[in-house]
Amino acid sequence: MELAAAFTHNRSFFTVCTVLPSGSRDPGQCVEMEATLREYLEKRGIQGFVRVITAAEPFIGAEKLSESYGIGPLVPNTILLGDSKTEDIRQMSYCQMIEKFHQQGRSVVIFRDSGQTNFGRYRKRIDIWWGGLNANGGLMLILAYLLRTSLEWRGAEIFLKLVVPDEAAAQAARLNLNQLVEELRIGAKPQVIIAYDRSFPEILGQSSRNADLVFLGMAQPEQMPDYESYYEGLQDLTEGLPTTLFVLAAPNFAFAEVLQDSASKTERTKAGRDSSKGEPA
């Protein structure tokens, strides 16, 4: 909830949802749960809604909630989940739920707590492992930008990390990333890493071990015939890392356009400030 609040800045349609087992709790317990969650939000100054439902199986309940929740055209476009550390649950239901959310056209962000350090730790460094602006890359940049402009993460540095095989590829990659960062004006710092025959897991572990938050994109379910095994691989890949967010962008959403629009607004705001000071815009 702390992470979601930092993303939304109390300016979005934000709902905390819980699915309780049906048959094992009476209606009064659902009311008590809603009251507890509302009290939690109010004490922390977080503006949000609370939704508690019952279902025979929590993952099925989550899928149905995603399908039905909203007001007219105003429906959730991003779902933030906790990571599942239980292998049997991941194989049976968890990964199927992720696939269903993706089919519904929702973006999915999975919060994986390292268990070794406090969430966010110093809130000074955000690492994004880059695979391109399209698909997950655009969404990761948007989320990192929203996070850095929140009160809790203000001043954090965003590092845009890209692995290439050799120096020849690094030259072109540096040029492309520098151009991208300049165009988007989100203050990220590009970092091109030459592999030198090292594996990506090795590079990831060495380069992001001191980050406060790590962003990694997820493959689309339709590209992976065995999504459960793929997700198990992500678990192994991020073992020992600080808090990590797995990001699966909604299909066909123009995140690049959102970023470019944000960059234009930033430039107009800066020009307005300069003009108010009597300086050339």
Image: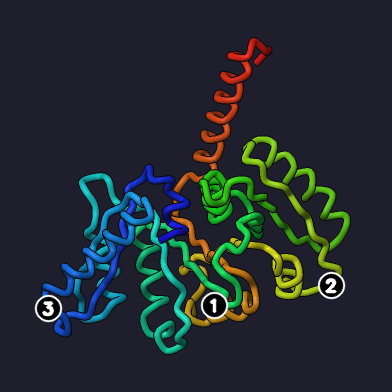
The residue positioned 56% from the left and 29% from the top of the image is: 264
Residue 6 picture location, percent across and down: 47, 52
Q: Which of marks 1 and 3 is nearer the N terminus?
A: 3
Q: Earlier in the sequence, mark 1 or mark 2?
A: 2
Residue 196 picture location, percent across and down: 86, 68
Pointer 3: residues within 10 angstroms few (<14), some, or many (20+)? few
Amino acid type at image mark 1: Tyr
Residue furthest toward the top? Answer: 278
Q: Tell me the mark number nearer the camera, choosing from 2 and 3.
A: 3
Q: 253 left or right of 280? A: left
The one of 71 and 51 positioned closer to us in this rendering: 51
Res. 240 image quadrant:
bottom right
Amino acid type at image mark 2: Asp
Kind of element beneath mark 3: loop
Query: In the drawing, what numbered circle is on residue 197?
Result: 2
The residue positioned 33% from the left and 57% from the top of the image is: 41
Query: In the drawing, what numbered circle is on residue 230?
Result: 1
Q: 152 left or right of 107? A: right
Amino acid type at image mark 3: Asp
Q: 243 left or right of 96? A: right
Residue 206 picture location, percent across and down: 76, 70
Kind of element beneath mark 2: loop
Q: Can residue 167 be seen in this view?
A: yes
